[in-house]
Amino acid sequence: MSLEKVKLKVKLVMKDHQILNELLGQISIFLNEDTIKNNIDHVILVLNKITKTIDMHLKLEDEYIYPSLIACDIPHISKTAKEFQKEMRTLSDQYKTFSQKWHSLDTIKNDLKVFTKELVEIVYSFSDRLDREEKELYILLDEVD
């Protein structure tokens, strides 16, 4: 895939970033036990939306963005893409573990303290990751004419 086509796909990914940041912002309001407990249905609804968006986002990155950037003839773009892809796999695995562990309302209610702690970690990890992708990886495409 040409870098011009990759740039178009990155625009789609950036829209996903906007959606994910909005959803992460919505759930950030509930990052303590009491607010989660009092708003558990809403938290689960937002988490489901986050999961669906992340799944689509990762598929786009894994199938198009990262392979194309890694195959790029510009060494620092290729190297940076490899590093980000490796990190994303780790974060993706962490999110899958989180969503499988906290798959039901009862599971969450039974250990609200641990759920809250892990939710905080996931929210901050994804927020940081989205920001870094934009500032450290996708910006490199601006160098390419």
Image (cartoon, rainbow, N blue to C red):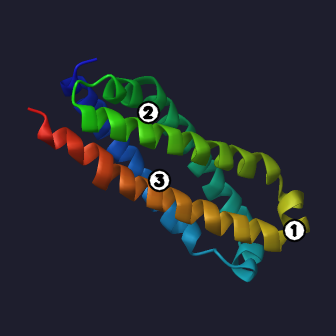
Location of the N terminus by quadrant is top left
For the residues bearing labels 3 and 2, Cβ distance under 8 angstroms: no
For the residues bearing labels 1 and 2, Cβ distance under 8 angstroms: no
Q: Residue at x 63, y 69 (%)?
A: 120
Q: Secondary structure at mark 3?
A: helix
Q: Can you give x and y, in whole percent of width and height, for residue 25 in the image?
A: 49, 67
- On residue 111, the disc is 1
Amino acid at the residue labelled 2: Glu
- Residue sitting at the far left: 145
In the image, taking residue 57 as reference, residue 7 lies left or right, namely left
Q: Can you give x and y, in whole percent of width and height, for residue 73 in the image?
A: 23, 24
**Viewer-side label of 1, 2:** 2
Q: Residue at x 27, y 37 (%)?
A: 77
Q: Can you give x and y, in whole percent of width and height, for residue 16 in the image?
A: 41, 45
Mark 3 lies on residue: 20
Q: Can you give x and y, in whole percent of width and height, for residue 17 in the image?
A: 40, 50
Amino acid at the residue labelled 3: Leu
Mark 2 lies on residue: 61
Q: Nearer the viewer, residue 57 or 71?
A: 71
Neighbourhood count class around disc 2 (C-alpha, 10 Å): few under 14, some 14–19, many 20 upward: some
- On residue 79, the disc is none
In the image, taking residue 65 as reference, residue 87 lies left or right, namely right
Q: CA distance from mark 1 to mark 2?
A: 33 Å
Q: Secondary structure at mark 2?
A: helix
Amino acid at the residue labelled 1: Asp
In the image, taking residue 133 as reference, residue 112 lies left or right, namely right
Q: Nearer the viewer, residue 39 or 32?
A: 32
